[in-house]
Amino acid sequence: MKLRARRGLDTALALFLASPVLLVSIVLHVLPGTPERLVHHALLPIIGFLGLGLLGFGFYLCLKLEKFPLFIGFSILCTVAGILLAGFLSLRLHREFFSALIQYILAFPFLFLAYIRRRAGKGFSTASLRSLSIVGIVIAAFYAQWILMMGYAIATRAEPRPIQSLLYNSYNIILAVALALLSRSIEMGTWKRLIITEEGLTWDDKDLEPILGQKKMSMLRAFALAPERILHCPELQRIIHKEGEEAGSCAECAERETKATLCQRYRATYNSLLDIKRTLEFLGIGTITSPENKRRILTEGWKLLLFEDVRLQSRDLKPLE
């Protein structure tokens, strides 16, 4: 089923990228106002479907290629073929085909990003993937700006072909949005995920309990679920001493302004947090921070800070704010 779905998606994507010539041909065939210098209108759909079939087959093969050099060469060849076809038709038949030429220019960056996304960024560094994601979003943004300019021209009646422009821009909007979403998905693929489950936490699909132990795992999970990921000494005490001895309260020490380090319970909590911090930093997950003013540790507590490329998610993979 997955293979069949993937083939269907590849076919739909290839036909979508190859369809600008067909779109222009249908527009010229159906809408009035076509110059007499055009060939007979009945030939326009035939030309469009021939271009769709040939370019669609080429783009489909691009999506199936595994070796990167071969993919680059063939995808550039198919993109150039689409540009040359649209340019030839615009010079010999009608200038409307220049719209298809512009649309084919985006075929290569779309194919390139789709190739990277499908292979989960293998062969590329995290920095390279993020840079490519930014480039894709920038291209989509510039293309969206062009769409807005065309929309403004239509709204102010400066565009003499409003219906044709609306049809072309409908395709352009889908292409720009798809390119932006594809670029965004590549960036999201570089994220590392700390996932909360009912029992604990997983990191890269590995349970952290064998590394941290049950109590430290409970402490870390409590940090992940706490508001602003901040916990105070009494809250951590209740986790550590939930079995057997009661946790006690820090209120008396805070009122007397007693040094927290004089409390045996505090020292045990601090040592556990220090072990968690070292493990998080070693695994590249994050760290545990304390207030700059150490005397405020009882009132301000400790905070879990995740590294920039780490996202905290629930079991159903929904991000937690």
Image (cartoon, rainbow, N blue to C red):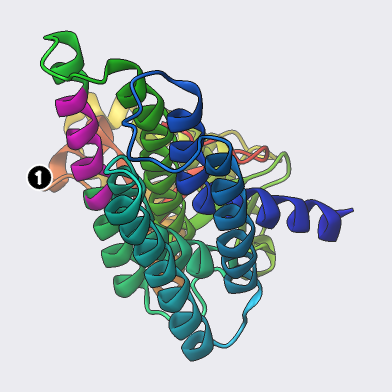
* Residue 72 appears in the rendering: yes
Q: Looking at the image, which residue is at 33% across and 21% down?
A: 33
Q: Nearer the viewer, residue 313 or 245?
A: 313
Which residue is under mark 1? 293
- Residue 177 falls left or right of residue 152: right
- Is residue 146 shown in magenta? yes
Is 203 above or below relative to 171? below
Give the position of the C terminus as an image quadrant. top left
Which stretch did the figure color magenta?
139-150
Residue 147 % position (x, y): 24, 31
Please rate how many residues cluster around mark 1, counting C-alpha atoms within 10 Å: few if below 14, some from 14 to 19, many from 20: few
User: As drawn, is 272 to the left or to the right of 150?
Assistant: right
- Please tell me whether residue 154 is drawn above or below residue 82 in the rendered image: above
Foreground residue among 243 and 64: 64
Task: Note whether 161 is above or below 100 in the view shown.
Answer: above
Q: Amino acid at mark 1?
A: Asn
Horizontal and vertical percent for residue 281? 37, 69
Question: Residue 28, how many percent across, how many down?
Answer: 43, 31
Which residue is the extreme one toward the top? 156
83 to 41, vertically: above or below = below
Q: Residue at x 37, y 71 (%)?
A: 80
- Which sits in the foreground, 307 or 136? 136
